[in-house]
Amino acid sequence: MSNLPLLSIVLWLPLAGAVILAVFPRRAEGAVKATGLIVSLLTFAISLAILPRFLQGTPGMQLVELHSWIPDWGINYGLGIDGLSLWLVLLTTFLTPIVLLSSWYSIHRYPKEYVISMLALEFGMIGAFLATDLILFYVFFELMLIPMYLIIGVWGGVNRIYAAIKFFIFTIAGSLLMLVGILYLGFLHFQQTGTMSFAVEDLYGLSIAAKAQVLMFFAFAIAFAIKVPLFPLHTWLPDAHVEAPTGGSIILAGVLLKLGTYGFLRFVLPFFPEAAGEWAWLFGVLAVIGIIYGALVAWVQPDMKKLVAYSSVSHLGFCVLGIFAMTQASVTGSVLQSINHGISTGALFLLVGVIYDRRHTRQLADFGGLARIMPVYAVLFVISALSSVGLPGLNGFVGEFLILAGSFETMPRLTIFAASGVILAAIYLLWLIQKVFYGPVVHEENRGLPDMRWNELLAVLPLIVMMVWIGLFPQPFIRRIEPTVEQLIAVSTRGGSERPTLAARETATTAEPVAEQHTSESGAAR
Amino acid sequence: MNLVPILEPNWFQAILPEVVLSISGLVLILLDAFAPKLRHYFSHIAVLALIGAAFAALSAPRGAWFGAMYETGLLTLIFDYIFILATLLVVLLSRGYMAIQRLEGGEYYALLMWGTVGMMMMAKGLDLLIVILGLEMLSICLFVLTGYHRRIPISNEASLKYFLMGAFATGFILYGTAFVYGLTGSTNVLQLAQWTTSTAAMPPLMTVAVVLLMGGIGFKLALAPFHGWAPDVYQGAPTPVAAWLSTAPKAATLVALIRIWDALAQGEARPAWAGLVAALAVLSMVVGNLVAIAQRDLKRMLAYSGIAHVGYMMIAVYVISPDSVAAVTIYAVSYALMNIGAFGVIALLQKNQNDAQTLDDIAGLGFRRPFHGIALAIAMLSLAGVPPTAGFIAKFYLFKTAIASGAIWITIVAIVMSITSVYYYLRVVYYLYMKDADEPAVETGRDIFSTAALAISSIGIFLIGILPTGLIRGALEAARHVIAP
């Protein structure tokens, strides 16, 4: 039992499901949907088996699987899971059945291809989180673009083509530049050790000259900043979100964006600690601009889905701020907030989709007084919104608090501005709730709207449970994240307690080990 | 030197693949004359001949033949297989196409066989004259095949254009070869390599020779700025022929170029000449990719995409090393699979061949004909270099080699152009799956041969994309024997 390649099973099961579905006849719509749901539920169940096997005190990769893939280039099929990826993997396997369930009645065009795309997407996402080899990561990172492109482009709204192509071009432009960086890292490893390797842990120890480090830092950081998305590279996101079908939006916000924050933590900071330290101020500033800008734009949106999309820009700004603040609390908060955002924004997109299916409009002005017509729906929506706002007792609070408290230590001024984002979030979401749920029923056609259907209820309730669970008992989640974050910070500061600088790197490349060389000039980071 | 070279033992086995293909070409053309009722089986005969040639190539002894004018080795074996694979796929695609277009004939398959022999000679020739002989043998077959649509004006136009410009290009190569011979007293690449290493200062006229050779070869490869013929020829030629002439002949020409380049471009003169190669590569990547964006005709789009891909492959010549030659080998295999896969689906579109085959014709094909849709989508994603396809592995190896050789700026140009190319490759996927067809929709034909060809290309693309190790090792091993590290 212990010899079972658990991670591989979780990874390949969705793809196997997709392949099996490919031979189903197209008319068997119910069977296709049911099989897709069963496969994704099975994947989730098996992924839960990771939890008891995951040792919480261990910072490094666990349940490691390593097979050589292209030995001549030092490329391995390496899988592993640690505190950074554990909850993200579970979030992925958790959200996929929810997505399939929520779109049970809303996808009528080519349902078979839709389910196949979703499972293929799940395969790509899990692979990207589990990969311990940079090339393997890159393969999965690119692989999931295609199903997402199809999901937006085939099942999306009116402007779906524009949104799909924009999404694809933005992401692939970033990732191809990253590929140059990846190749250069592999080449450096060859220069410094005499063997080719793309294993992430092997690359952590590389010493990279200052100039090359800054260039590569940006090659990687831009790729992930597009994915997050960080202001001003966020423009593809509202388009993609508004045009994507509900299921696509949930996965996009819930998991795909998290690859950006995950990439920063897994690759950018530990690979290029000096450059990251030097340029942390830039990313902090952009993150805070994103927080405030996203919130302000969300405030004036007349379209519910666009509002939630811009709130994502704002919320992920917090995550990026926490990452570049580089304290134990802030980074832990960022990881946790990635999960929280996936849950609460996923629920919001799902609920917006519910109302859209009924009325085929998402304009705030088309609603009002829904609380009386759809009471269950209203309650669920309000809980999700409050979770997104960060109400104590729900999950959003824990993450945001950790990020703000942690960031204040190293970036106090930026954190003060960032904190205003919390207030703005309350404003725009309560504004939305007031417009949609309270007041008189203005539009007569809203009177006959049915409340939640069985499949919608089944899809949302697990999310609500998780909001409360993480909100009340965050410790079990945090405990599993912390050791890895601690190690990450140690690697990213080259073992010191202060940020290393590029100047130190310059002397270090001429002299010797890095850790002793860094000065206390971490002020340069601000 | 002996005027009559003494024949080495086993020389016949060494050229057995060429012999098999030449004779089957003759048989096909004779059958067409004397037993036209067998026409239905000509493609079967061609397939058998190619399989026979594949076995013959495998058992061919390795070494240099005919007074070191002809070489067989691991590299030529791999390239023999590339040519045979490409021709095989084209034969499979031709059957249905030729039946629908009422063009069945023995000479069509005979020309494919003989053209393959020409390519094998180009790849194996150690002597510039053998290379030119092979090139001419190939070119003449291509001129005829391009105009094979006798009744269709654009096909005739394409053939004439290709012939006139191709003749010019051959003239350039011959003229360059004459210079080389005049300067060195030899046309054998092995002796040329010796001459280059023993000569302290490269005579200036050699630069003229290299420029002439590069011009002629650049034409054959459709490198910018010698690419003008390619879009018209691809558009006019019968689609399976376009699939063929866009892949296998380019691979053959690249091998010849690599041999000549490795022999001549040594020492001091190399940086200046390498600049020429880099300029051609960059120009091809930029022109090919940017102009491809503007194309709505699928065959013209693939023509420009082909110009861009040869541009990428020229990076390997620029940084020439065993690794880069191995990279180009893998690129050539991958490119053959994905380009023939793409042309294969276009060949199945049932439409008057004098009209353009545009993006609109494939609208909604992905749901109308799922197999054809997915085959074309896989080919496009591979051309775009998305993992885990052969196109990704090929580009990855090429860029990795280039970066390791310090050619970072040209790699960045290549990557930026790859990003650009994603736009037009993805547009095909968009038409396949996201656009509703006009009424009446253009149908695609279905026959078992074309299905087999598309299946081979799609599976091959993933096979190289996921399990490339064997191919990488073989190609590198082969390249080490040919190129000095």
Image: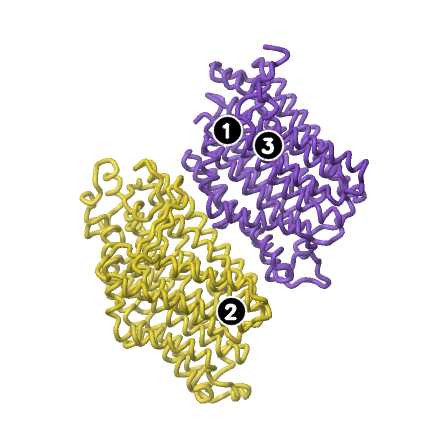
Horizontal and vertical percent for residue A399?
A: 29, 68
Q: Which residue is mark 2?
A: A245
**Apparent side of residue B249 relative to residue B159 in the rendered image (left or right):** left
Which chain is indicated by disc 3?
Answer: B
Q: Which residue is mark 1?
A: B274
The residue sitting at 77% across, 42% down in the picture is B38
Mark 3 and mark 2: span between their CA atoms? 56 Å
Q: Of the residues shown, which amino acid type is indicated by label 1?
A: Ala
Which chain is indicated by disc 1?
Answer: B
Locate residue B132: give its quadrant: top right
Q: Is residue B333 visible?
A: yes
Q: Of the residues shown, which amino acid type is indicated by label 2?
A: Pro
- Chain A painted colour: yellow
Horizontal and vertical percent for residue B122?
A: 61, 28
User: Decide: marks 1, 2 in contact (CB < 8 A)?
Assistant: no
Indicate the quadrant containing the C terminus of chain A: top left, top right, bottom left or bottom right: bottom left
Horizontal and vertical percent for residue B398?
A: 47, 39
Indicate the quadrant containing the N terminus of chain A: top left, top right, bottom left or bottom right: bottom left
Instruction: Name the mark on residue A222.
Output: none
Q: Are marks 1 and 2 on the same chain?
A: no
Crowding at dot 1, Cα within 10 Å, few <14 / some 14-19 / many 20+, comes out as: some
Q: Which residue is mark 3?
A: B56
Mark 1 and mark 2: span between their CA atoms? 51 Å
Q: Nearer the viewer, residue B74 or B347?
A: B74
Q: Nearer the viewer, residue A161 or A58?
A: A58
**Apparent side of residue A136 relative to residue A265 in the rendered image (left or right):** right
- Chain B painted colour: purple
Secondary element at tag 2: loop
The residue sitting at 32% across, 35% down in the picture is A194
Q: Nearer the viewer, residue A197 or A2?
A: A2
Q: Are marks 1 and 3 on the same chain?
A: yes
